[in-house]
Image: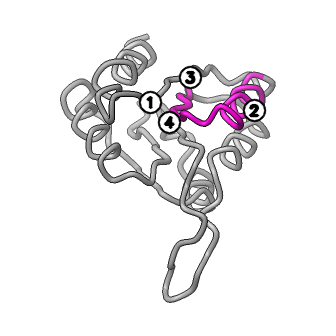
Amino acid sequence: MPAYIAILEDDVRRLAAMRECVASHQPAYEIAAFDNADEMIGWLEDHLAEVALISLDHDLPLMQMREGVRVDAGDGRMVADWLAGRAATCPVIVHTSNENFGPGMMRVLRDGDWTHCRVYPHEDCAWVATAWAEELRKFLSA
Protein backbone atom coordinates (compact mmCIF):
# COMPACT_ATOMS: atom_id res chain seq x y z
CA MET A 1 0.00 0.00 0.00
CA PRO A 2 1.33 3.49 -0.81
CA ALA A 3 2.54 5.21 2.31
CA TYR A 4 2.77 8.92 1.45
CA ILE A 5 0.71 11.99 0.75
CA ALA A 6 3.05 14.38 -1.06
CA ILE A 7 2.28 18.09 -0.68
CA LEU A 8 3.75 21.14 -2.41
CA GLU A 9 2.93 24.09 -0.15
CA ASP A 10 5.02 27.01 1.14
CA ASP A 11 2.54 28.49 3.63
CA VAL A 12 3.33 27.07 7.08
CA ARG A 13 -0.23 27.65 8.33
CA ARG A 14 -1.77 25.80 5.40
CA LEU A 15 0.72 22.98 5.79
CA ALA A 16 -0.03 22.73 9.51
CA ALA A 17 -3.76 22.51 8.74
CA MET A 18 -3.07 19.82 6.14
CA ARG A 19 -0.95 17.83 8.60
CA GLU A 20 -3.74 18.07 11.18
CA CYS A 21 -6.32 16.99 8.60
CA VAL A 22 -4.29 13.95 7.52
CA ALA A 23 -3.62 12.97 11.13
CA SER A 24 -7.36 13.15 11.88
CA HIS A 25 -8.76 11.53 8.74
CA GLN A 26 -5.96 9.48 7.16
CA PRO A 27 -3.48 8.65 9.93
CA ALA A 28 -2.01 5.67 8.06
CA TYR A 29 -0.25 8.05 5.65
CA GLU A 30 2.98 9.92 6.15
CA ILE A 31 3.26 13.44 4.72
CA ALA A 32 6.14 14.34 2.44
CA ALA A 33 5.99 18.15 2.28
CA PHE A 34 7.94 20.46 0.00
CA ASP A 35 8.16 24.21 -0.57
CA ASN A 36 10.35 23.88 -3.67
CA ALA A 37 9.24 22.31 -6.97
CA ASP A 38 12.64 20.87 -7.94
CA GLU A 39 13.04 19.25 -4.52
CA MET A 40 9.59 17.68 -4.79
CA ILE A 41 10.34 16.37 -8.29
CA GLY A 42 13.64 14.91 -7.09
CA TRP A 43 11.86 13.13 -4.25
CA LEU A 44 9.08 11.90 -6.53
CA GLU A 45 11.64 10.41 -8.92
CA ASP A 46 12.55 7.96 -6.15
CA HIS A 47 9.19 7.62 -4.34
CA LEU A 48 6.32 8.06 -6.81
CA ALA A 49 5.28 4.41 -6.48
CA GLU A 50 4.89 4.94 -2.72
CA VAL A 51 2.60 7.97 -3.05
CA ALA A 52 -1.16 7.59 -2.51
CA LEU A 53 -2.05 11.23 -3.28
CA ILE A 54 -0.34 14.45 -4.40
CA SER A 55 -1.52 17.96 -3.55
CA LEU A 56 -0.05 20.90 -5.43
CA ASP A 57 -0.11 24.63 -4.84
CA HIS A 58 1.03 26.83 -7.70
CA ASP A 59 2.57 29.93 -6.16
CA LEU A 60 5.83 29.48 -4.26
CA PRO A 61 8.30 32.11 -3.10
CA LEU A 62 10.33 33.47 -5.98
CA MET A 63 13.64 32.86 -4.24
CA GLN A 64 14.72 30.68 -1.33
CA MET A 65 17.98 30.10 0.47
CA ARG A 66 19.43 26.60 0.21
CA GLU A 67 22.84 26.01 1.80
CA GLY A 68 23.62 29.72 1.58
CA VAL A 69 22.65 29.98 -2.09
CA ARG A 70 19.59 31.77 -3.50
CA VAL A 71 17.51 29.40 -5.61
CA ASP A 72 14.27 29.70 -7.54
CA ALA A 73 11.55 27.68 -5.76
CA GLY A 74 9.71 27.09 -9.03
CA ASP A 75 5.96 26.51 -9.01
CA GLY A 76 3.33 23.82 -9.00
CA ARG A 77 3.09 23.82 -12.80
CA MET A 78 6.63 22.41 -12.93
CA VAL A 79 5.52 19.43 -10.86
CA ALA A 80 2.31 19.01 -12.88
CA ASP A 81 4.35 19.02 -16.11
CA TRP A 82 6.73 16.43 -14.66
CA LEU A 83 3.80 14.23 -13.60
CA ALA A 84 2.16 14.55 -17.03
CA GLY A 85 5.24 12.90 -18.54
CA ARG A 86 4.77 9.79 -16.40
CA ALA A 87 2.13 7.10 -16.10
CA ALA A 88 -0.60 8.17 -13.69
CA THR A 89 -0.24 6.39 -10.36
CA CYS A 90 -2.35 8.36 -7.87
CA PRO A 91 -4.85 11.23 -7.67
CA VAL A 92 -3.71 14.85 -7.61
CA ILE A 93 -5.39 17.77 -5.86
CA VAL A 94 -4.54 21.19 -7.26
CA HIS A 95 -5.06 23.55 -4.32
CA THR A 96 -4.35 26.99 -5.73
CA SER A 97 -6.34 30.19 -5.91
CA ASN A 98 -4.23 31.36 -8.85
CA GLU A 99 -6.76 31.74 -11.68
CA ASN A 100 -4.06 32.48 -14.23
CA PHE A 101 -2.06 29.27 -13.75
CA GLY A 102 -4.37 26.79 -11.98
CA PRO A 103 -6.23 25.93 -15.20
CA GLY A 104 -2.97 25.08 -16.96
CA MET A 105 -2.04 22.69 -14.17
CA MET A 106 -5.43 21.03 -14.51
CA ARG A 107 -5.04 20.76 -18.29
CA VAL A 108 -1.63 19.06 -18.23
CA LEU A 109 -2.82 16.61 -15.57
CA ARG A 110 -5.90 15.82 -17.65
CA ASP A 111 -3.80 15.40 -20.78
CA GLY A 112 -1.50 13.07 -18.84
CA ASP A 113 -4.49 10.95 -17.74
CA TRP A 114 -4.00 11.74 -14.05
CA THR A 115 -7.09 11.61 -11.84
CA HIS A 116 -7.27 15.13 -10.46
CA CYS A 117 -9.47 17.84 -8.97
CA ARG A 118 -9.24 21.47 -7.97
CA VAL A 119 -9.77 22.87 -4.50
CA TYR A 120 -9.99 26.64 -4.09
CA PRO A 121 -8.42 28.05 -0.92
CA HIS A 122 -10.78 30.36 0.97
CA GLU A 123 -11.49 31.60 4.51
CA ASP A 124 -7.82 31.57 5.53
CA CYS A 125 -7.12 27.84 6.17
CA ALA A 126 -10.71 26.74 6.85
CA TRP A 127 -10.95 25.13 3.39
CA VAL A 128 -8.40 22.49 4.39
CA ALA A 129 -10.77 20.91 6.94
CA THR A 130 -13.71 21.06 4.52
CA ALA A 131 -13.06 21.02 0.75
CA TRP A 132 -9.53 19.58 0.84
CA ALA A 133 -10.46 16.97 3.46
CA GLU A 134 -13.46 15.90 1.38
CA GLU A 135 -11.28 15.25 -1.67
CA LEU A 136 -8.76 13.43 0.50
CA ARG A 137 -11.50 11.12 1.83
CA LYS A 138 -12.97 10.62 -1.63
CA PHE A 139 -9.67 9.69 -3.26
CA LEU A 140 -8.19 7.62 -0.44
CA SER A 141 -11.27 5.62 0.42
CA ALA A 142 -11.83 4.45 -3.16
Identify the mark at residue 121; answer none if there is no mark: 1
Which label sits on residue 84? none
Residue lying at 56% horizontally and 29% vertically, measured from the top left: 92
Mark closer to the chain start, 3 or 2: 2
- Drawn side of residue 79 relative to residue 107, left or right: left
Q: Which segment did they paint magenta?
A: 91-110
Q: Give percent across and percent down for residue 48.
A: 57, 43
Residue 37 point in image, percent of width and height: 60, 56
Residue type highlighted by circle 3: Arg
Comparing labels 1 and 2, the label whose residue is closer to the camera: 1
Circle 1 SS class? loop
The Cα atoms of the two marked residues, 1 and 2, are separated by: 17 Å
According to the picture, the residue beneath numbered tag 4 turns out to be 55
Residue in front for this viewpoint, 56 or 50:
56
User: Disc 1 and disc 3: Cα gap in Å?
Assistant: 10 Å
Measuring 66% from the left and 47% from the top, which residue is drawn there?
Answer: 79
109 shown above or below 137: below
Q: Type of residue at label 2?
A: Gly
Closer to us: mark 3 or mark 4?
Answer: 3
* SS at circle 2: helix
Q: Are marks 3 and 4 in contact (CB under 8 Å)?
A: no
Is residue 141 shown in magenta? no
Closest to the observer: 101 or 138?
101
In what element is the residue under mark 4? strand
Q: Label 3: which residue?
A: 118
- The residue wearing badge 2 is 104
